[in-house]
Image: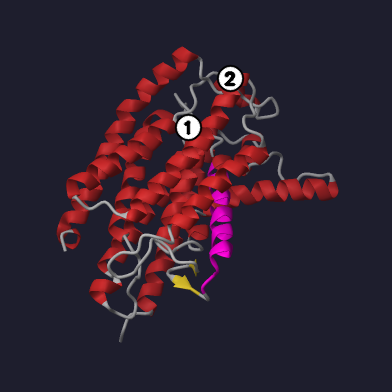
Amino acid sequence: MLWQKGGLVRTVILAAGISLLSALLGTPLAIRIFRRRGYGQLIREDGPASHATKGGTPTMGGTVIVIACALGYFVADTIAGHMEASGLLVIGLMAGLGVVGFADDFIKIYRQRSLGLRAGAKLAGQAVVGAIFAVEVLHFPNGYALTPADPQLSLFRDFGPTLGVLPFVIWIVIMIAGTSNAVNLTDGLDGLATGVAILVLAAYVLIANWQLRNDCPTGLATNCYLVRDPQDIAVVAAAGLGACFGFLWWNAPPAKIFMGDTGSLALGGLLAGLAICTQTMLLFVILGGLFVIIALSVIIQVAFFKTTGRRVFRMAPLQHHFELLGWAETTIVIRFWIVAGLCVGLGLGLFYAQWLATAPG
């Protein structure tokens, strides 16, 4: 009852505030450390010419996002005295993929090349972290026998037949790898991926809060939600939201630091974990619509080129196509943020409409 009488709101605000301040104050420290050690971004030679000036900008800033998010979550939940399995698992997923991304970034810097881990090695790392998460979310039942996730597909809630453990693990690994790689592909312009992640994380704060206020153990309505820890998921999302806001202050055009694969893979894991534990896996395709569009642009470009020898876009991912059309970087970022906001609005609208459609009476 503490959560439902304002405790959740206070904890969410505390988590967001701590992570915001941690990222806002910690990022300039990271910039100085990375610059002193020569941890600068290496620019692809085949990229847009305008990116040449970004060479040497400190990278691996995603470490700040991960640390700030974890700090906000743990401090806020420790004060509230209500840490749960779902939140811990999502934070663990974020940190695990952050480690994979850090290895990729470090190899780029150490070997002074624009490519880090080989594709197979990166996918293997994502698969191992994703598989551990997929197995663990099926454990840790609470007093109502609810686990952080069930072996089913989900849209607004779980639906359809129960999958076996192995098919579920494979599906979750694919989802986590796909989401983290989609965020990684989006991270090509200053502030783009960070801003889009903020919008989606804000949506998950709202979704988890709504699920708590309409949870089945207390509400018992026909349209209630059988989600194990919506309160803790809201705190995780808020912590991620604050961390991204703090980082965006320094990552906005012209960026003083890049998140690197450390940040993009970690954020992808955070978003995938939130979708899995709120039973909105397929809804994430809409909420994170811009990530999906950008990932599809790469798939289309590669498939069409291998089939016909020609390109659909001047360059993929999609944001670089518009750069080569002459759009200013800030114009692309703001317009893509608008598209991302529309996707989030559509996803939230569908989520609420489904709740209304199943309301009694």
Task: Decide which of tag 2 and tag 1 comes sooner along the chain.
Answer: 2
- Cα separation, mark 2 vs mark 1, equals 17 Å
Residue 194 vs 35, above or below: the answer is below
Which numbered tag is attached to residue 50?
A: none
- The residue shown at (33%, 49%) is 236
Q: What color scheme is it? A: secondary structure
Which numbered tag is attached to residue 259?
A: 1
Residue type indicated by callout 2: Tyr
Judged from the image, the secondary structure of the residue bearing numbered disc 1 is: loop
Judged from the image, the secondary structure of the residue bearing numbered disc 2 is: helix
Look at the image and tell me in which quarter the N terminus lies: bottom left
- The residue shown at (52%, 55%) is 289
Q: Is there CB contact under 8 Å for labels 2 and 1?
A: no
The residue labelled by disc 2 is 110
Q: Which residues are magenta?
A: 162-183
Residue 58, position as x, y percentages in the image: 48, 22
The number of numbered discs placed on residues in the rendered structure image is 2
Q: Could one spot residue 212 in this view of the protein?
A: yes
Q: Nearer the viewer, residue 199 or 28?
A: 28
Question: Circle 1: is it few (<14), some (14-19), or many (20+) Cα within 10 Å?
Answer: many
Question: Residue 52 lies in magenta, yes or no?
Answer: no
Q: Nearer the viewer, residue 318 or 263?
A: 263
Q: Is residue 119 rendered to the left or right of residue 251?
A: right
Look at the image and tell me in which quarter the C terminus lies: bottom left
Q: Could one spot residue 344 in this view of the protein?
A: no
Residue 243 vs 113, above or below: the answer is below
